[in-house]
Image: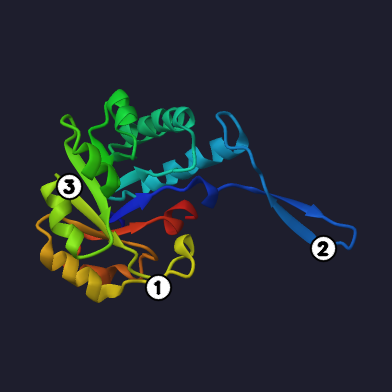
Amino acid sequence: MYGKMIAVTNHSLCRGREIEKGENGRESRTEIPAFMPGTDTWIRYLAQIRRIVSARPRAIVLREKDLSSELYKCLAYQVREICRGAGQELIVNTAPDIAHELGTVRIHIPMSVLRSTGRPSWVEWTGTSIHSVEEVKEAIELGADYLFAGNIYETDCKKGLPGRGLEFLRQVCNESTVPVYAIGGVNEKRLPQILETGAAGGCMMSGFMRM
């Protein structure tokens, strides 16, 4: 089943927590803030990537939007080695210069970037995220090899934003000539109904980062 899934990373979902007891004896949990090379949180994250790789998803998108360019590059090098060792596909998110430096020919970039700079000439597999049926044709004409369509279900990542639903996903799939992956609230239980719309699979973040 995981072979139909693309794993999307988010380091905040697998970071450890320190447990402290206050004067009243109650436990309080505080996130360990550091996410830097060599820290416990960094090591824990790489261990989680190894667990994800062992599940054999379709690919791994290294998302991590809140990291600096230098920190993202450092992380990408280490994740690339884990993926290479397991024969797993790694997709760099939003950073074509880093992808090129890593020798990675798969990249996921926002529609806004695809519109402004186009598809990098050296890339073999380019994906983008669409949020309307009208964007499907435009994304493909701009060179997208696959699409993330969402958000399909309500998700904690976008609190308060209603899911667009399976009918929206079906319309996107009917319009698209490239593989479509559902994103937003996707999990293993929902995958069968996602596949029934004609989608190639789903993208899962929380399920993979907390497995």
Q: Which residue is mark 1?
A: 162
Query: Looking at this rendering, what residue extends furthest in the right direction?
Result: 23
Q: From the viewer's perspective, is the residue at label 1 or at label 2 nearer?
A: 1
> Is 139 above or below relative to 186?
above
> Is 111 above or below relative to 38?
below
Q: Which residue is mark 3?
A: 144
Mark 3 or mark 1: whose residue is earlier in sequence: 3
The residue lying at 30 percent from left, 74 percent from top is: 165
Front-most of residues 101 and 211: 101
Label 1 secondary element: loop
> Is 165 above or below relative to 139?
below
Q: Which mark is residue 188?
A: none
* Cα–Cα gap, marks 1 and 2: 35 Å
Q: Which mark is residue 26?
A: 2
For disc 2, the neighbor class at 10 Å (few under 14, some 14 to 19, many from 20) is few
Q: From the viewer's perspective, is the residue at label 3 or at label 2 nearer?
A: 3
Mark 1 or mark 2: whose residue is earlier in sequence: 2
Front-most of residues 84 and 139: 139
